[in-house]
Amino acid sequence: MFFPRALFPLAVTCALTACTGMSEQACLVSDWRTVGFEDGTLGRAVGTIGSYREACSKHGVTPDLATYRAGHAEGVEIYCRPSQGFEVGHRGASYQGVCPADLEAEFLTAYNSGRHLHELEYALREVDNLIAGNYRAQENIKQELTTIAASMVSNETTAEERVLLVSRAAELGRTYGELSASIDELKQERVFHEQNLRAYQETLAFGA
């Protein structure tokens, strides 16, 4: 199984036509082979030219489909390298099925590996976010309890208000305890996800 030694993002200049839509100027001056090449290196389907055709028809320009396809095929040869497949999967990006049959098998093996790594990392981040969110909620509770304590000793607080404040403080105390229990469970879950991630990382045989 192939896995890259490092992640090398494609150093491809994004054409104005591919990134922001086809302007009249772009329609008139675009080198369709270059546009196709850039789309290919970015893993865009050859059908992307359809959006250019629609945009340029408003300006009386018809893209050169044959030239675009030739450039696209060249770009796909770069995109479909296993190292790029791993990078695409690791980013969590989708694969548009652009690789030719002779390159797709290795590309998909690497892509699926990167995708699995992405999913494991995402699961760990999600648990971390939940833990952090619970801690923030506890801090908010502490602040509210401090406000309640100050109100309880205030001469301006009525007896009826103190009863409500005591009830609110008890409710906040229960919620704080529930959050603490949740944090403990999430920390155990975090250990599980971290172990899965580390174990998978150790299986990656980085090769050229």
Image (cartoon, helix red, strand yellow):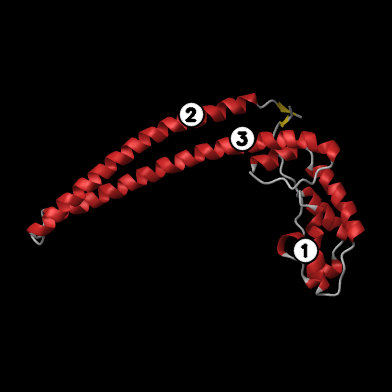
**Three-letter code, disc 3:** Leu
- Residue beneath label 1, please? 51
The disc at residue 117 is 3
Task: State the SS at label 1.
Answer: helix
Q: Can residue 34 be seen in this view?
A: yes
The image quadrant that residue 51 belongs to is bottom right
Q: Which of marks 2 and 1 is nearer the N terminus?
A: 1
Cβ atoms at labels 2 and 1 below 8 Å apart: no
Cβ atoms at labels 1 and 3 below 8 Å apart: no
Real-space CA distance between mark 2 and mark 1, rounded to the nearest whole angstrom: 46 Å
Between 154 and 203, the one nearer to me in the picture = 203
Q: Residue at x 91, y 57 (%)?
A: 67
**Three-letter code, disc 1:** Ser
Task: State the SS at label 2.
Answer: helix
The disc at residue 192 is 2
Task: Specify the quadrant that holds the N terminus.
Answer: top right
> In this rendering, would 198 be left or right of 22?
left
Above/below status of 152 relative to 54:
above
